[in-house]
Image (cartoon, coloured by chain):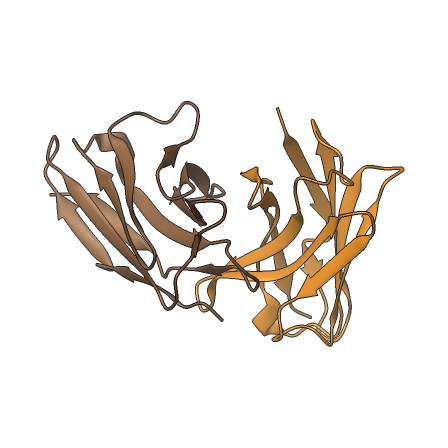
Chain colours: A orange, B brown
Amino acid sequence: QVQLQQSGQGLVQPSQTLSLTCAISGDSVSSDLTAWSWIRQSPSRGLEWLARTYYRSQWYYDYAISVKSRIIITADISKNQVSLQLSSVTPDDTAVYYCVRGSQASVWVWGQGTLVIVSS
Amino acid sequence: DIVMTQSPDSLAVSLGERATINCKSSQSIFHSSKNKNYLVWYQQKPGQPPKVLIYWSSTRESGVPDRFSGSGSGTDFTLTISSLQAEDVAVYYCQQYYDVPLTFGGGTKVEIK
């Protein structure tokens, strides 16, 4: 059974960098059948996909245009985890952030979510 | 981007009655070579992450009651709850995974009448 355990800051100051990590159990971050995304949810934006990474003989990365200049998604094979960094945050980045496994070939699994508040 | 439009925004249904939620994509999300529609339906309750109910538009996730069913193809999809139970009060979302950016419907809030 795949489980995703999220960790990271719950409070970030404006202009700083938000960092979240998703530890994966029951699957491999380098599986060639799936992909790993970060998705956030807020009352103003609803559910918003931010970024994705997957391995198909090499690593691939996709980013939402709205955050592309500020976001990095990385995968760590040795720790079997995926991470998110979002820089230059503003109060508009306040949301619940989810780590999500899913692709056209695999079942969708969501982490428990991390509430991130951007405030001084 | 593929825009997902859900309707209605909310609905109130009597216990034991049928609830129907619609989801329309701005372009086809049917992959002809795979013969699959890349659509997933979620149920979300307050304080919880979305829970997968249906994927590939009509395949029920393991453990999901059979009163939940998904149908449709191409651009028009439906989630049906055949006999609403009290525990089904939640917000329901559709999401396409045909292409990035992955996109979601705005949600449908289901309540008891």
What residue do we see at 68% from left, 63% from top? Answer: A62
Horizontal and vertical percent for residue B61?
43, 30
Horizontal and vertical percent for residue A21?
75, 47
Q: Is residue B85 above or below residue A66?
A: above
**Of residues A97 and A31, the one drawn nearer to the viewer in this rendering:** A31
Q: Quadrant of the C terminus of chain A?
A: bottom right
What residue do we see at 86% from left, 37% from top? Answer: A79
Horizontal and vertical percent for residue B79?
27, 44
What residue do we see at 44% from left, 63% from top? Answer: A43
Q: Residue furthest front?
A: B33
Q: Is residue B109 above or below residue A106?
A: below
Q: Is residue A19 above or below residue B13?
A: below
**Of residues B17 and A14, the one drawn nearer to the viewer in this rendering:** B17
Q: Is residue B11 left or right of residue A110?
A: left
| Count of marks placed on residues | 0
**Of residues A117 and B6, the one drawn nearer to the viewer in this rendering:** B6
Q: Is residue A71 left or right of residue B86?
A: right
Horizontal and vertical percent for residue A117?
62, 61
Q: Quadrant of the N terminus of chain A?
A: top right
Q: Is residue A78 left or right of residue B51?
A: right
